[in-house]
Amino acid sequence: MNADDLAFADVVEQQRLLTRKAISSLELTNVYLERLERYGDVYGAVVTILHDRARREARRADRERARGRVRGPLHGIPYGAKDLLATPDAPTTWGAAPFRTQRFDFDATVVRRLADAGAVLLAKLAMVELAGGFGYNDADASFTGPGRTPWNAAFWSGGSSSGSGAAVAAALVSFAIGSETCGSILYPATACGITGLRPTYGRVSRHGAMALCWSLDKLGPMTRSARDAELVLRAIAGADPADPTSVDAPFPAARRRPRIAVLKNATKACMPAVARNFNASVKQLATFCDVTTSVALPAFPYDEAVGTIVRAEGAAAFRGLIESGRARTLRQADDRIGGYVGYETRAIDYIDAQRARTLMTAALREAFGAYDAVVAPTLPTVTYPVGVPFDSVYAEFEGNPNLIAPGNLAGLPALALPNGFGDNGLPTNLSLLGTAFAETRLTAIGKRYQQITDTHRARPTLTTTPA
């Protein structure tokens, strides 16, 4: 196995090599550190590479393995963390110029739990400034520049976990931690052709993570396979006294033959390649799932409710930045004023959005609760080109009944799976929306799907020439 094969192997495969002592954690770590140096800036994926910490943790993992102590399936596996997670080893920048020198003296709970599992932290990964809460309208929305998908560097790697998506797709890390408020794991998973798991709200502690929207924020794994996503989730899940919204909840057993529903009009207003790949995926899912077609999404203003909640809570989270005027130093033009728009959100609008959210959650439970998953294209298009306003492209594909906003409002888990390629060689993706705390039923479906398909094993051709 050469260095590229090793870097693109998933966690399960890498752990087998470590167990056989075909490679050490330090050797694997050095492979990734070299790749981060070579490709990280090209794809706008990296803020800080943690050379000393990574090698220290890798050596510890190797010493423990030599003594017969293996902490679990992530022991010795190198990963990257979105740069909204606190660590004491480097600044935690939140992707934003006003916070470039911000430091914390502790590890976020997710980072600590991964260390307890024996994982090796390689780098703090790039992100859209302030996780996109101020309404950015183009890809150049981080002080590190635009994230670029490894499949075509002229196109965006997706927000706001842009660096996490690009780093996994380019095999600069074995896996990454991203965050999602409304699409920031699922979108970059699509743009970068990787697997992304958005956990149930409360499944994973957010202590030490930047707050954008307390009632919507979630942390989750971005990986090369569904089996990896489940392993990482199990390591980071659970109640944390430092985050009162986090809970302990069991992981349900997978069903022998899952029940899935295809969202009604799922391919409405989709690019032809997205529709074609999705229809092929449904046929593949039907070989091991019971499929019900045309299950309707209850009609509610999901996007409007999410927008109101994010604007109000985001303005509260960044009140000091807004009131000080430092928001005007953000990189993206719309972000410089977006905080002030949020600041003017009326309390009655926020309360009405939260009240409507309760009704929406109940309606989704009634419509989808009988199924292990509801399946739809994650996005109706491939990702956006870099260098143009988002609202100037793909207007003809508006009107797709997307599940991202409904699922986030209800705090439900979702699994994004690569399922093919479309225009400009860019990946397409499908999503499975599940019931609360039933992530393992989604990953069971994802694992079966990836056993009979191979898109998740595809590798981009990388470049060292900046776009």
Image: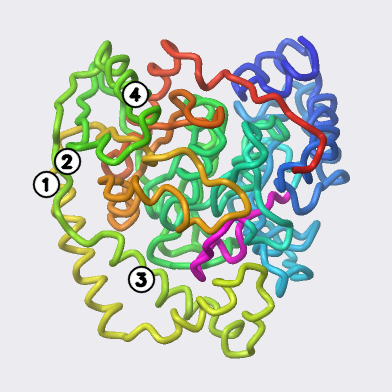
Q: Which residue is mark 4?
A: 276
Q: Earlier in the sequence, mark 1 or mark 3?
A: 3
Q: Residue furthest right?
A: 52
Q: Residue at x 63, y 30 (%)?
A: 74
Q: Could you tell me if the residues under marks 1 and 2 are in contact, i.e. CB atoms within 8 Å?
A: yes
Q: Could you tell me if the residues under marks 2 and 3 are in contact, i.e. CB atoms within 8 Å?
A: no
Question: Which tag is nearer the camera, tag 1 or tag 4?
Answer: 4
Q: Which residues are magenta?
A: 124-139
The numbered mark at residue 309 is: 3
Against 210, residue 411 (above or below) is above
- What kind of secondary structure does the magenta stretch mostly adopt? loop
The numbered mark at residue 369 is: 2
Image quadrant occupied by the C terminus: top right
Task: Answer yes or no: is residue 422 visible.
Answer: yes
Q: Which residue is mark 1?
A: 366
Q: Earlier in the sequence, mark 2 or mark 3?
A: 3
Q: Is residue 80 left or right of residue 319?
A: right
Q: Name the secondary structure under disc 1.
A: helix
Q: What amino acid type is highlighted by mark number 4?
A: Arg
What is the CA distance from the residue labelled 2 to the residue labelled 3? Answer: 25 Å
Against 178, residue 449 (above or below) is above
Question: Which tag is nearer the camera, tag 2 or tag 3?
Answer: 3
